[in-house]
Amino acid sequence: MLTRKQLELLDFINKRLNADGVPPSFDEMKEALDLRSKSGIHRLITALEERGFIRRLAHRARAIEIVKLPDALSGATAKATTAAAPAFAPRVLDGGQRSAPTPPADPVAMPIEAVHALELPVMGRIAAGTPIEAIEHVSHHVAVPGSMLGGAGQHFALEVKGDSMIEAGINDGDIVVIRAQDSADNGDIVVALVDDQEATLKRYRRRGGTITLEAANPVYEPRVLPEGRVKVQGRLVGLIRSY
């Protein structure tokens, strides 16, 4: 038995898969269900997966596969599928001629889009909780769509440790993409270096001569520090999650 919200989300994902061949983003799910934060979507997705209605595909962002539908949706879906247009498929060049688009064998498992990707260094782990010692060596590299970077400048990635930014949609184990810069606007999520030795991922607020580093989890209290103790290392521009 599914709750009303679980059923609404499953219906929304299924309709988007039938229409576009790819699942919606978490932001789109949040808006469709009129939820205030993406953490609610995470809970609904987990519940649907535990009940065997969906499967999340490893190492692919937004990769969700419908396994089955409840009776309340299966009948309506069959009618909609009959009238629906073919799912999106990339065109294949053969001898200089464009072939007609054909539905892929497994549209749900397709990459979201073919985009130019860049390799960014992952510079260790960043605390979304109690600050940890900054790590300044490259542990590995990660491929990031060029469109995520949003302009020129140096970028790097960090693995998130902790849950203090969970209500901003940032979970333990996520990879955050950071644009290197030494300043920030109020409300930006930044990598902040405290006392030149501790790095943390928090929302930035400047008031007079103090800097407040705010968590997105009520369990954690804001940290108010003199501006001389805090250095901005970069601003969050993207996030990568592996299921």
Image (cartoon, rainbow, N blue to C red):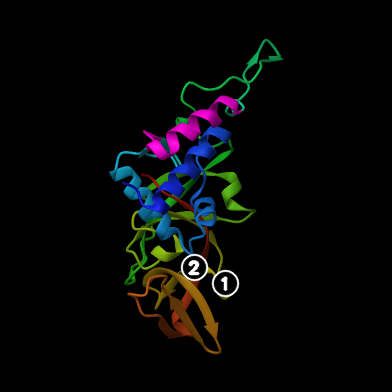
Extreme residue in the right direction: 97
The residue under the point 57% across, 76% down is 186
Residue nearer the viewer, 227 or 218: 218
The x, y position of residue 166, in whole percent, is: 39, 63
Quadrant in the picture for the C terminus = top left
Q: Residue at x 62, y 27 (%)?
A: 85
Picture layout, residue 229 above or below residue 69: below
**Furthest residue to the bottom?**
208
Would you say residue 56 is visible in this rendering?
A: no
Q: Main secondary structure of the magenta part?
A: helix
* Gap between marks 2 and 1 measured at Cα: 7 Å
The answer to whether residue 83 is magenta is yes
Q: Nearer the viewer, residue 193 or 185?
A: 185
On the rendered structure, is 51 left or right of 91?
Answer: left
Q: Amino acid at mark 1?
A: Ala
In the image, residue 180 sits, relative to residue 84, either above or below, namely below
Magenta part of the protein: which range?
66-84
Contact, CB < 8 Å: mark 2 with mark 1? Answer: yes
- Point 59% across, 45% down: residue: 146
Q: Position of residue 79 (x, y in %)?
A: 53, 29
Query: Given the image, on which type of amino acid does mark 2 rest?
Result: Val
Q: Is residue 184 above or below residue 176?
A: below
Identify the disc placed on residue 190. 2
Residue 185 vertical position relative to residue 240 in the rendered view, above or below: below
According to the picture, the residue beneath numbered tag 1 turns out to be 184
